[in-house]
Every structure is written in C-alpha cells, then in structure tokens.
Image: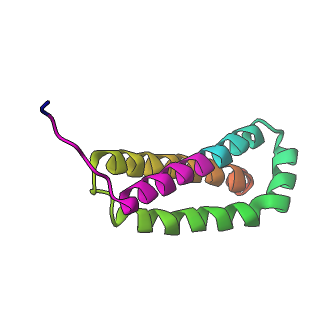
C-alpha cells in the first residue's frame, strides 16, 4: 500500500474552525443587513438609531479578528481560501453597513 498520510496540527484545525465561524457570523450579519436595506428609509433610520452602534462595534471586532487571522493565512490552501472568503465577506458587509448607515447623510448633501 503506497500513499502519504497527512497530519494536521491542532492549531491548524482550530484556525480553520475560527475562520469558518467568523465567515458564518459575518454572512449572518450581512443577511440581516440585506433585510434592512429592503426597508423604507424611515424604517432604516430607526433601525440605525437602535442598532447602529452595535453593528459598528461588531464590524470593528471583525476587522481586528481578521487582522489576527491573516497572520497565519498561508499555513495551507484551506486556511488561505477561508482567509480570502473572510476578507471578501467583510468587505461586502462593510460596504452594506456604509450604504445603510450613511445613506441619509448622502441624500442630504
């Protein structure tokens, strides 16, 4: 019997799990934000008033976590792919947040 056996360190498994969970969390926030985008401007303004600070704090936390995640992004192809997905999802989510939270100020200018 020929072949190779690959062992993955506990650190790499943990890193992959952390990245996977972060991507899921950000995607869930993005899903919620998509629902907010579908609201009327008045409802969006009320939503931002109630949840805007919490969303900003969450995004700041995700950015900090993403910077930590990138430290080991090149450990293997799967970690690299998850890191890329995390960054793309975070970028799209930030753009959505900006569109919702700053839409009113753009309309006024």
Q: Which quadrant would residue 74 be assigned to in this image?
A: bottom left
Which residue is the extreme one toward the front?
Answer: 1
Q: Residue at x 67, y 49 (%)?
A: 29
Q: Is residue 109 visible?
A: no
Magenta segment includes 77: no
| 88 relative position to 93: left or right | left
Residue 75 position within the rendered picture, expressed as x and y whole percent measured from the top left: 28, 57
Q: Residue at x 80, y 59 (%)?
A: 51
Q: How many marks?
A: 0
Q: Main secondary structure of the magenta part?
A: helix
Q: Is residue 104 visible?
A: yes
Q: Which region shows up in magenta?
A: 3-26
Front residue of 64/12: it is 12
Q: Residue at x 75, y 61 (%)?
A: 52
State the quadrant of the C terminus: bottom right
State the quadrant of the N terminus: top left
> What's the image's color scheme?
rainbow
Q: Residue at x 42, y 62 (%)?
A: 69
């Amino acid at each position: 019997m020929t072949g190779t056996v690959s062992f993955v360190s506990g650190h790499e498994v943990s890193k992959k799990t952390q990245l996977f969970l972060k991507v899921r969390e950000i995607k869930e926030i993005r899903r919620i934000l998509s629902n907010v985008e579908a609201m009327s401007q008045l409802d969006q303004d009320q939503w931002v008033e109630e949840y805007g600070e919490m969303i900003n704090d969450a995004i700041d936390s995700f950015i900090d976590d993403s910077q930590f995640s990138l430290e080991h992004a090149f450990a293997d192809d799967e970690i690299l792919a998850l890191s890329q997905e995390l960054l793309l999802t975070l970028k799209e989510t930030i753009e959505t947040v900006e569109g919702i939270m700053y839409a009113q100020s753009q309309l006024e200018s």
